Image: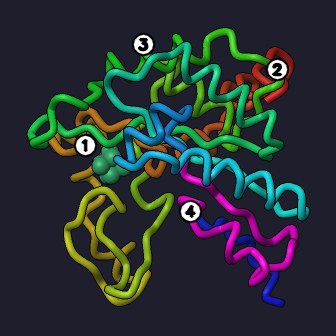
Amino acid sequence: ARKKYIYLCTNALLLKRKIDLFKPTKFLTFSVHMDGLEAEHDAAVCRDGTYNTAVEAIKEAVKRGFRVTTNTTLFEGTNPERVRLFFDEMMKLGVEGMMLSPGYSYQKAPDQEHFLGRDRTKKLFHQILANRKKSWKFNLSPNFLEFLQGNVDYECTPWGNPTYNIFGWQKPCYLLQEGYVPTFKELIEDTEWDKYGHKSGNEKCRDCMVHCGYEPSSVDDTFGSVAGFARTVKSAIAYGT
Ligand code: SF4
């Protein structure tokens, strides 16, 4: 009744069983976490059968008239051709749009094996997206897709996707856990925003190209500059997205 749009993130393992608890409405979208095709997805979550369970749940939700999107995080070692096949499969299932992001990169993170630096991120996304099919629908701004391929550069907007949970408002973004404040006003006014973003010199931000910080910058460019808007129109004409 509040007319708020909710994207309910889920791995979809229980979705088919619990789907009777929900009613289809334009205000509710199931955002299903999918790490790729069956082999990649099951390996990423360390459990065989999860891809097929999620696919069955997506089919059921789409059949019942629910809005369904996917969200996918890509890491080092991703095979671009397999990702393209994965997009085809998701479109066949009838999902409304696909969200993509590189995984969070931090050069001092312990898991360097799966770490994607900026150059490798751009190369990977260029291989996936450079001649993308018109049939693929993304739940992303065209400018963010250009950013991921290295065709345009943005600075992070860390306050663009604020995180609120039972502990409060998370500083500064959902990737970096630097404490919580009780109010949105404190988050905005007391956080030293200059210390964050790719160009800030903060080593935790240096290689980051993650959706939560850079999609807001992409959207801002779409509506805040002639060049950003023109890039969006060009993309819509070329790719239908
Ligand atoms: S660059 Fe932005 S989104 Fe990435 S870790 Fe830093 S503040 Fe968070």
The correct choice, above or below, for 193 with respect to 123 in the image is below
Q: Regarding mark 4 in the picture, which secondary structure is present there? A: loop
First in sequence: mark 1 vs mark 4: 4
| Near-viewer residue (6 or 147) | 6
| Magenta stretch encompasses residue 37 | no
First in sequence: mark 3 vs mark 2: 3
Q: Residue at x 47, y 31 (%)?
A: 39
Task: Mark 2 and ligand 1: say if the CB distance to the nearest ligand atom is below 8 Å.
Answer: no
Which amino acid type is shown beneath numbered disc 2?
Lys
Mark in the foreground, 3 or 1: 3
> Label 3, label 2: how many angstroms apart (C-alpha)?
21 Å
> Label 4, label 2: how many angstroms apart (C-alpha)?
30 Å
Disc 1: CA contacts within 10 A as few (<14), some (14-19) or many (>=20): many
Which amino acid type is shown beneath numbered disc 4?
Leu
Which amino acid type is shown beneath numbered disc 1?
Cys
Q: Where, by quadrant of the figure, is residue 169 drawn?
A: bottom left
Which amino acid type is shown beneath numbered disc 3?
Lys
Q: Where, by quadrant of the figure, is residue 13 drawn?
A: bottom right
- Left or right position of 122 against 234: left
The correct choice, above or below, for 67 with respect to 155 in the image is below
Q: Which residue is mark 4?
A: 13
Mark in the foreground, 2 or 1: 2
Give the number of the disc on residue 123.
Answer: 3
Magenta residues span: 10-33
Q: Residue at x 41, y 42 (%)?
A: 210
- Left or right position of 170 against 163: left
Circles 4 and 2: CB distance less than 8 Å?
A: no
Disc 2: CA contacts within 10 A as few (<14), some (14-19) or many (>=20): few
Task: Mark 1 and ligand 1: say if the CB distance to the nearest ligand atom is below 8 Å.
Answer: yes
First in sequence: mark 4 vs mark 2: 4
Q: Quadrant of the C terminus?
A: top right
| Near-viewer residue (57 or 160) | 57
